Image: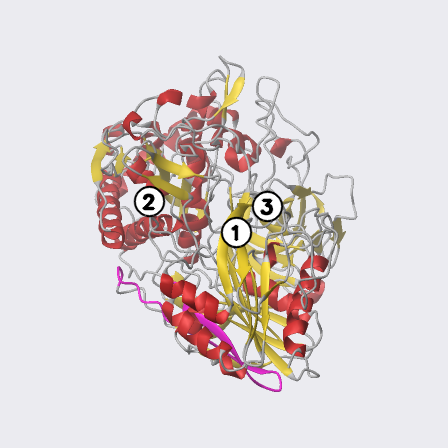
Amino acid sequence: MKKLLLWCSLIACACFANTIKAQPNGLLTDINYQGPPLTTNTAKPYSITAGLGGRHLSVWASHGKYYEAKQDSWQWQRPALFGTNEDLFTPTIVLPYLIPMLEKSGAIVLSPRERDLQPEEVIVDNDSENHLQYKETNGLQQWRKTSISGFANPKTTYIEGENVFKMGTARMAQGVEQEEERSEIVFMPQINNEGEKAVYVCYQSLPESTNKAQYTVYHKGQATTFNVNQRMGGGTWVYLGTFDFGKGCSKNNCVVLNNVCSQTSVVTADAVRFGGGMGNIRRGGSTSGLPRALEGARYAAQWYGAPLEVYSSKDGRDDYGDDVNARPLITNWWAGGSVFLPTKPGLGIPIELCLGIHSDAGVDKQSKNIVGSLAICTSNFNDGRLATGVTRNLSLKFAENMLKTVHHDLKRKFGRWEVRELIDRNYSETRMPEIPSVILETLSHQNFPDMRLGHDPNFKFVLARAVYKSVLRFLCNQHETKAVVSPLTPSNFHINYLHDGKIKLGWCETKDELEPTAKPTAYILYTAVDSSGFDNGLMVKQNEFEMTLPPYKTHHFKVAAVNQGGESFTSQILSAHYNPEATSTIMVIDGFDRLSPPAIISSPQRQGFDLNYDIGIGLGLQSPWVGRQQNFNKWAAGVDGWQGLGYSDASMEGQLVAGNSLNSAQTHVEDIAAIGKYNVVSASMKAIEQGLCKLSHYDCVDIALGLQRNEALATVNYKTFTPSAQKHLRNYAHNHGKLIASGAYVGSDMRDSVEQVFMADVFKIAFDGAIKTDTLLANIRPLVSDTVSITRDSIVALLYKSPNAVHYAPTMVDVLTPLGNAITGYRYPGWGAASVVYIDDKQKTHIFGFPLECIKDQADRRRIMAETINTLMNNN
């Protein structure tokens, strides 16, 4: 009987292959997935008609740390060069940029490597002993145990061959169509650390499973609902999204599953996972000791429930080889049984393209020229056919077009870029997937001219956008559908206070010089109130929006642009607060939008990056660094080991680094609102420079400059006070304005003669040098006198002083010298001026040589903010 079934299966596969040979060069004209996607965010206020809506992709960021059996140690797959390695560098392209771009265009992206850097992982499961976190409620239909095994997590670590998706049980309930008859399960985690965490669900795919299981994620009280197609993806972790969760165990932070669907279907339930977690696969007696996201795909695949042969193709003897193979093999396992991979068993997820993002070796001996990008594919395998019988030349075509787009966009944006070649050879990552697959070697991690751009987040964004556009056009071409590129983030975001709590928000379209279709047709305005999470957005057709704030509530806003192709990244967060008893209104200016590489060293003799002087600033939370560069000898380019240019230590291995979360204005508005006396609104510095807010309408202006500064060797100018900003601020200050400014480079970034005149004229300061932040802010002195003696060891506040996972930290802060009748406000240890106050009949200013939002303790920060504002406002 088994032989008969096998022969029937082989005949069916052969017949299927014959039916599609009529379209050997067209992947999707006759082959297409028509059903509901794996996941659908039903809360989005727009639809995507000319993007990647419903397309499933497998995307990964090259390597990760792996266990080397011969040396009985965990190792990185590539050497530490220029402060990083390939294992850590490529995720800084894929995680904050490429995957979000694809998802904002409508794609469902699966990643063989863990995508969430958060080390905290909380799993709520029906098999756990804590029933306060897992709670079933029965309506018309009761939850009951399924007949096959499910997920359980009985151990802290696991060895090869152990499958957590076969260690427990799962639940199921018959569907109901009426809301009042619903049964539900609440998965409520105990969260120790507030912040963003990925949410994964798991379930079982049964013959009668629903294609519309409704999961609602509550994140800081806001609800976002997803439909999950449980007919596919059963027995693995299915990603829903990343959300901001509060600390503790609360209904405000949980996931709820219900059984409202077709009566003929069943809903299955297993576990919900919050956060990426730490690596828990034990090899040679130990785990990596790192967040799972920094490990190789081999270990993630085991945690995802993949069969042994997926992650241990080398029989457990060669984890390096296993890891290389695990990326395509888990893709095949996910896609097996779908329309794009009908010849192999699997989870039935219709993945139709896979892409690996790598970096490569290669060096210019003069350390002068860019080595650039190359692409890899495999067209000559299995008689040149994929599992569906279509030609493998599709991978070749995709690779060609991607290289062209990458070269065009990078050269246009940065003045130069090189493309090496397109390699069509037998690489396992491009041979083993049975769907179109390509590797992009983004640049040479061994070559300083490449990494000088490669470490720049602005470069990473343009590179990722070129790759996203290539994926979009390839799949739309194959499906014969229209391709529209999603817009860029709106610019000049600002809020003006009108009267009686009424505000007007405004923003501008950002034109994409590289893409004519990337034009917005509407905007999405996201709102959060006080400490709640952001809502799912309101569609706004125009580039402005008026509303009346309820009293005593602080509202936070961010805006994105949308079109038929998808959604842009969101803007910085701006905030507003209405106090009906207030007689004064304060404007907060967000002047910190910098995203930049670490300090660049480029001289005739030395090249590299000085992380001790300036570690740079990335977007959000990342783990980009393995250590600090030790060898800067330009003439040692291409030399291996410690004698070579770029050689770096391992002092930062596994360290998570918080970057620019684009929320400086939010912190300042909240701190001012806490005083209880003022209305507060906020605006971006670019909006101020464009004259979109009249500063004269505000009783006080507070400028948050964070780590803003201009760097001559970087690709984007991030000047603290541009000439346009100087003009507006000088006019405001000289007309009885009250002005506050804070930032790590307020003095050091204003060094030419014109800039020094501005600082002396408006803030009454001169720059008096910078100090390392290994000493902390201390030693308060009265704001009205510089003669009162204060104990030298009295502590006012502590700063974030070194890279950490909670908040960006300055590595240097400015010492300021009061000019004329100005006085010192606060002091650093050693008695240098940390801030300077100037008060006369015409203008009142207080400037800080460090970012106020970098004060660790909220109470300290708010006390200093209150003292500062009240002093300026009360000296009339």
Q: Which residue is mark 2?
A: 453
Q: Position of residue 224 (x, y in %)?
A: 59, 61
Of marks 2 and 3, the one in the foreground: 3
Which sits in the foreground, 311 or 691? Answer: 691
Q: Residue at x 65, y 43 (%)?
A: 271
Question: Does residue 48 show up?
Answer: no
| Snapshot quadrant of residue 234 | top right
Residue extending farthest to the bottom is 499
Question: From what the image shows, is residue 820 above or below residue 161?
Answer: below
Q: Position of residue 572 (x, y in %)?
A: 49, 63
Tell me the amino acid under the disc marked 3. Answer: Lys
> Is residue 495 magenta-colored?
yes
Q: Which residue is mark 3?
A: 801
What kind of element bears circle 1?
A: loop
Q: Residue at x 67, y 72 (%)?
A: 871
CB under 8 Å between callouts 2 and 1? no
Query: Which tag, 2 or 3, sits closer to the chain's start?
Result: 2
- Label 3, label 1: how far apart the Cα atoms are: 47 Å
| Snapshot quadrant of residue 565 | bottom left
Query: Which tag, 3 or 1, sits closer to the chain's start?
Result: 1
482 to the left or right of 236? left
Mark 3 residue crowding within 10 angstroms, few (<14) / some (14–19) / many (20+)? many
626 to the left or right of 388? right
Which sits in the foreground, 7 or 160? Answer: 160
What kind of element bears circle 2?
A: helix
Q: Residue at x 67, y 50 (%)?
A: 798
Query: Which tag, 2 or 1, sits closer to the chain's start?
Result: 1
Tell me the amino acid under the disc marked 2. Answer: Leu
396 to the left or right of 52? left
Q: Which residue is mark 1?
A: 229
Q: In this picture, which residue range is highlighted in magenta? A: 488-515
